[in-house]
Amino acid sequence: MLPHDIPDDAHLLELIEARHPASVSLVVGSSPRPSDHERVRIAVRDAIDRAAKRLDELDLPHGVKHATIERLRRPLQDDDFWEHQSQAMLILATSEMDEWYRLPFEVEDEVTVADRFDVRMLMRARSDIWHAFVLLLSRGRVRLIEVTSAGLAEHPLEMPDDHQLMLQRANNEGRMDRGPAQGADGDRPERERFCKVVAEAVGAIVPRAVPLVLCATDDLRQAYRAQNRHPLLLDDEIAGHPEALADRELEERVMEVLRARNAQHVKDWKERFGNLRQQGLATSKVAHVAAAAAAAAIEELRVDRKASRSGDIDEWGRLLNRDGDRRFLLLDLAADVMRTGGEVIAVPREDLTDGSPVAAILRFEVQTPNGG
């Protein structure tokens, strides 16, 4: 896969809750191509210089700025890190710690210096839908290709050297004068055995949470589906012979499948949201969402992946707007939901409703603190 790093719920909560007067968050575009790495290094250095200027504006204890900048610069010389780059990176640092994350999508460069980290990109990475694997399956060739918004990456499958021989039936029970069984099902056991080996090799590479799309010849399609163990093998397939598709055409067709899948999911979700809102079990009002989060009432929270809203919430879910407050309200809401076992999904604004940056599905009905 394109390298990327996604923290688990516990660590993401730690990052959201962390407070330090000199918390630096850098979002920088990158590239998996080694020829681009020097350009990316320069972009990272420029971002660090911008952060240093902002740190100069803060009243910090002696040595904090220097220690923070040194931590930001340290991975620039880490050759192992640079050998496996993706489309972007998120760099988090204080004077006491630093963490670098690779992101599998394009970004706009951004520098944030505050009393907390801006980890919205990590929430987006956890919810990225433009990511799938496609299995090209024929008697002559088997390929596994990863498709992201950044392009294609092929993954060699670890298969037995003689796996192609599995498709050659020797059903003569030791008698050389008897040929193989003929007809549509004549080599069915061989096809199933072949596809079982392929399915095991695919399962060793494709993450369980990433969709798998099949492009197979007619004789192997059902055999593979019968042997598949990947939980997200999609019903939609790529039409055409697997050995005849150019990479660009393959990429376009996979993206069409993902777009159609996402559009149906959004349609279904909006219909469900509307029905639940009539029952008092869904809301897109920020104040109501905040109250529900404080009451541990949110089953699912969807947030605009690009939105930030200054402000704060108190323990009763009331919104507090304070001048100069640098905390991100949506991240606090997400943390409240994650602490109480709810799911947080970062989506494009158009996948939400009512023009709001948030939408919540509730476990039980909750009133806002002022009764609204």
Image (cartoon, rainbow, N blue to C red):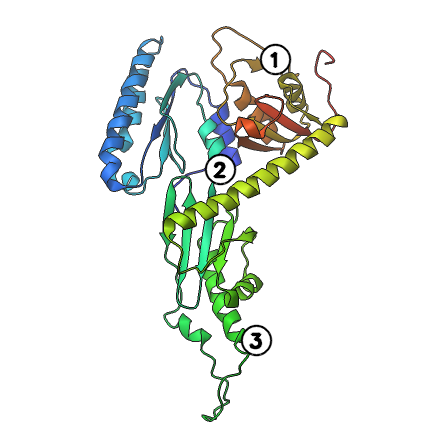
Towards the viewer: 172 or 205: 172
Q: The residue under label 2 is which amino acid type?
A: Asp
Q: Which residue is mark 2?
A: 128
Which one is earlier in the sequence, the residue at label 1 or at label 3? 3
Q: Nearer the viewer, mark 1 or mark 2?
A: 2
Q: Residue at x 42, y 55 (%)?
A: 144
Q: Nearer the viewer, mark 3 or mark 2?
A: 3
Q: Is residue 128 left or right of residue 155?
A: right
Q: The residue under label 3 is which amino acid type?
A: Asp
Q: Residue at x 64, y 23 (%)?
A: 284
Q: Is 276 placed above or below 175 here?
A: above
Tell me, for residue 185, which label it has, or none. 3
- Where residue 168 appears, as percent x and y from the top left, is 44, 78
> How dense is the environment of label 2, judged by Cα within 10 Å: few (below 14), some, or many (20 and up)?
some
Q: Is 305 placed above or below 8 here?
A: above
Q: Residue furthest right?
A: 279
- Looking at the rendered structure, the secondary structure element under dot 3 is loop
Towards the viewer: 236 or 33: 236
Q: CA distance from mark 1 to mark 3?
A: 66 Å
